[in-house]
Amino acid sequence: MASGFLTFILVASFVIYSSHTGITDWDDVVVTREGMSATLICNDTTVRGAVTINWMVKPLGADEWQLVLSASERKEFSGGASKASMRLTDPNFQDTGVFSLFFLPKMEDSGLYSCLIKQQERKLKERIILLAILTVTVVPAAPILQHSTLRLIASVSPDFAITKITWAAPDGISIKSERKTKVGTVAKLPQVQTGDNGAYVCMVHPRGNSSSKLFAFNVDVTVDANNVASFTNITHAPMISTATQAQASFTLACPGVQGDYILLHWQPPDARKQTSMKLVYQYDRWRGSTWLTEQSKKLQLAGPPFNAEAGSFSFLLTPGLKDGGLYVCEVYLNDNVFSQRTRLSVLKVKTSHSSSKMELGCLYSERSQVKSAIWKYQNKSRQLQLFSNSLGSITAILPTPITSDTAGNYTCTLQLKNGQTVWATQAVTLPHEGGRDGTVSLRLVCFLIFFHQQCFIRPA
């Protein structure tokens, strides 16, 4: 009856913990890697003489204990769940008190193990050990081509036996890792180089009672010194054709996939076809590294709902007129590439003055996608004097001084070939409203006549 009650308690505890209540009803945790040997420690130097040792296992999901090995001073035999490699580490266990079990476990051998010591059918000691099996996968297979993405994937069965898995590089520095459901703990090194060769360390941190604070396993990585990976699996999203005002914050889209790192290339506006693209931004979320150029000063990784550290990418661009052009954002996920091309026109308005006129200039870049550009006055019935003295510009002429008939809002509207429009408005004010025509400012003009200073105000 007592033995049955004890078995019920152990079964209940195991099931309860599997429901994630936090109970750890075992005396020790042992983690071994699949394909490596395991030794389950069970010692009691106070025990001497005629004793019997029973090793039992309760596999994951099982309700009952199964005998795997039993030994006494007269004989040693195995139970129905035993393995050929199972043996006691010390055949003289009656004299030494060392009852530890050695064997070569497979993944299906994880579970609870009981070391039960009896003397004349009286229970002297029982020790419960949770055996967890580590599986490590290295992708791609060695030797790894340069520039490919190294994936180190580790999982433990049962996963509730541990709190976490961490990874360290050959130089001992911790590397970023993420725990993914049904996959395990993944660490990645994009664009590997020959300098990434070496023994990486997978460290498993056990949960609850354990004689070891962590279990460390070396994982050898070899990078091919002579061959470089080529990324041929490229998915191209439809081209985005769009426009924005100069100095306005603009969201530059990247492919909507979670990735490992991004490259942003740029071709200046109105460039000839043979003009090569320039790499202007590179970000590796696993290494936490960023590569920038002068053009990058106008770029930043976008915040929520995007999260670059988690692999969700987009950019915020604050462009000048010359920052239009073709942008290509490439997101790399393992050995796959996802590409998003954006052709951007930038619109900018400016004013200039002379003694007889004010010029409202409307400038725009990446002309190949522009259908039309036009100035309009708030009073739509008024015809404007327009001219264009260069490609990518249209200018409206206003006579000065500005009057109530010519003051007001002037809007330059840019229409793209896809029908999208963007506009910018320039307010032109009367001189007495505190401004120079079109720029809200006045100029003080002074003359020195016969040693007396004469001053008057006129539009600049």
Image (cartoon, rainbow, N blue to C red):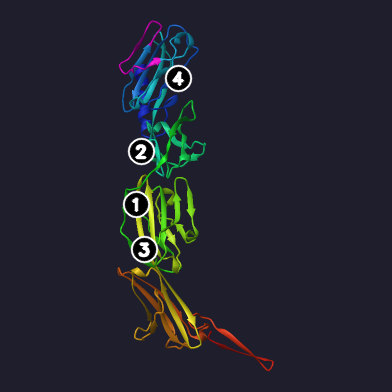
Query: Does residue 98 sit above or below 336 in this rendering?
Result: above
* In magenta stretch: residue 190: no
Disc 4 and disc 2: Cα gap in Å?
Answer: 30 Å
Image quadrant in which the N terminus is located: top left
- Give the distance between the C-alpha atoms of the residues marked 2 and 3, in whole angstroms: 45 Å
User: Which residues are drawn in magenta?
Assistant: 71-87
Front disc: 1 or 4: 1
Does label 4 or label 2 sit earlier along the sequence? 4
Tag in front: 2 or 3: 3
Mark 1 touching mark 4, by CB under 8 A? no
N-term mark: 4 or 3: 4
Q: Quadrant of residue 328?
A: bottom left
Residue that mark 3 sits on: 273
Q: Which residue is mark 1?
A: 338
Residue 443 against residue 305 in the figure, above or below: below
Dot 2 or dot 3: first in sequence order is 2
